[in-house]
Amino acid sequence: MTIAPTPPTEGAPAARAGSSTRTPAAPAKLAFATQLLLIVCGVMSILTIGIELFGVSAATSYLGGSESAIVMIDLYDQSGFLVAILSSAVLIATGVLWVIWQYRAAKQVDDRMRRAPGWHVGSWFVPVISFWFPYQNISDLWRAAGRARPSWQIAWWLLWLGGSVVIQLSTRTSLAAQDLEQFRTAMWLSILGEILVLAAAPLAWLTVRGITQGLLQRSALPVPSHAS
């Protein structure tokens, strides 16, 4: 990502001098594509959970003395690798579309944002502030779109953060594992992380839909005439 974020301004969103008060139509096609990929992400999470449960079963059988379980473990390794590649590709594609959608949405109402559109992209990638700034930016978009921030937004954010952290922990545990018991622990962590991400997916879908619809309605309002 080469977009350099503009330094944020302090305080609540306020109109910027000289900025337009009406915006073009919201990026509906881009929002639709983002929503579609969010659904695919949910499907990949379900598939990953199923494979990890299969891996836990195979590892448990082998640790219990079943020599034939080695065939199941081999199958888990092969299928798990393929699904991991597909999941990563889908996640990257979804993330790229999301930040492009968010950037364009923020640019349409930049007179009502506390931070410039560049920060709506950059805040996702800057350490530490990425734990909170994106949440604030999405909150600002809800308000700028003329809609109240939904009560479930904090649930979406905590589920997404929790899932991301647990999945990273699972990956590190798997890479550092020295025996099958440690690999099984990594599998359980992966299952937990994917469950959290799966729960966050429909809320992310609603976020994109709600903000986009609000921007569409806002852009459809007639431009007020000013007496000369």
Image (cartoon, rainbow, N blue to C red):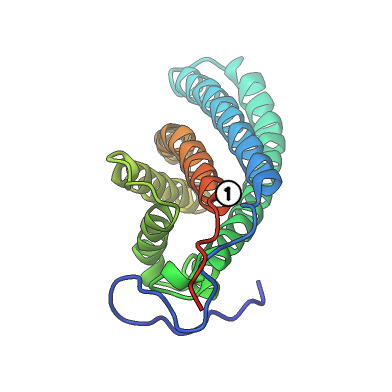
Q: Is residue 202 above or below residue 18?
A: above
Above or below residue 210? Residue 202 is above
138 or 160, which is in the foreground?
Answer: 138
Image quadrant where residue 63 sits: top left
Q: Residue at x 55, y 26 (%)?
A: 46
Q: Nearer the viewer, residue 161 or 103?
A: 103
Spot occupied by residue 65 in the image (x, y as percentages of width and height): 47, 17
Residue type at mark 1 is: Ala
> Is 68 placed above or below 132 here?
above
Secondary structure beneath disc 1? helix
Q: Is residue 186 left or right of residue 150?
A: right
Q: Compared to 99, does 114 lie above or below? A: below
Q: Position of residue 47 (x, y in %)?
A: 60, 26
**Residue at left 51%, top 79%?**
228
User: 187 left or right of 77?
Assistant: left
178 sits to left or right of 104: left
Residue identified by numbered label 1: 220
Q: Is residue 39 left or right of residue 176?
A: right
Mark 1, other Cα within 10 Å: few <14 / some 14–19 / many ≥20? some
The residue sitting at 40% across, 36% down in the picture is 196
Residue 225 percent across, percent down from the top left: 52, 65
Q: Which quadrant holds residue 181?
A: top left
- Which quarter shows the N terminus? bottom right
